Amino acid sequence: MGKTKKTFPLVYGGERQRFARSVVAGDFVLLSGCSGRTLETGEVSSEDVREQTKVALDKVRLALEEAGSSMENIVKVIIYFKDMKDYEIVKETELEYYKTHAPALTESPPASTVCQVVSLSKEDMLVEFDVTALRG
């Protein structure tokens, strides 16, 4: 059986971006960083890290579904923080989100890495999720 790859475009505010929203490669779905930028406008949803986290996780869920997967299939998450002081709020929001949209992840969580970065791609972004999941 040959290797397969399928790319799904990322569109912010009707404008196609120069990188993919996700790539399906064999049995894996790899997402581009999901932040608090809304798909409708491309602008950050709020200055509140909890709200940005919810928007980012909504984007994760929608991208996985578009690629034929689901949040239940997440195997690895990397969370980039602008400021580590937001760690507890983001992790709490992530757990609440999983309880609603991927309950299995509350008992069997994915591998996870967190790190603070100097900046994200937009100055007002506070958090970004990099996700790898299994397909199907």
Image (tube, rainbow, N blue to C red):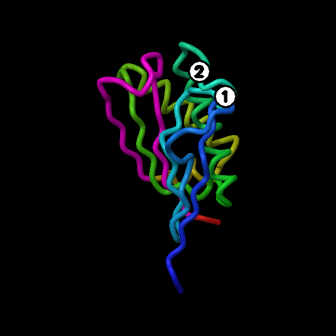
Secondary structure beneath label 1: loop
Structural distance between the alpha carbons of marks 1 and 2 = 9 Å
Quadrant, the C terminus: bottom right
Check contact, mark 1 vs mark 2: CB within 8 A. yes
Residue 109 is tagged as none
Residue 37 appears at what percent x and percent y?
A: 57, 26
Q: Residues within 10 Å of mark 1 (few under 14, many from 20)?
A: few
Instruction: Give residue 74's quadrant in the image.
Output: bottom right
Of the residues shown, which amino acid type is indicated by label 1? Gly
Along the horizontal axis of the image, is 61 left or right of 114? right
Label 2 sits on residue: 43
Residue 56 appears at what percent x and percent y?
A: 57, 33
* 115 falls in the magenta region: yes
Q: Who's the residue at 61% across and 30% down the image?
A: 54
Q: What residue range appears in magenta?
A: 111-134
Q: Residues within 10 Å of mark 2 (few under 14, many from 20)?
A: some
Label 1 sits on residue: 13
Nearer to us of marks 1 and 2 is 1
Secondary structure beneath label 2: loop
Residue 135 appears at what percent x and percent y?
A: 59, 64
Along the horizontal axis of the image, is 1 left or right of 72? left
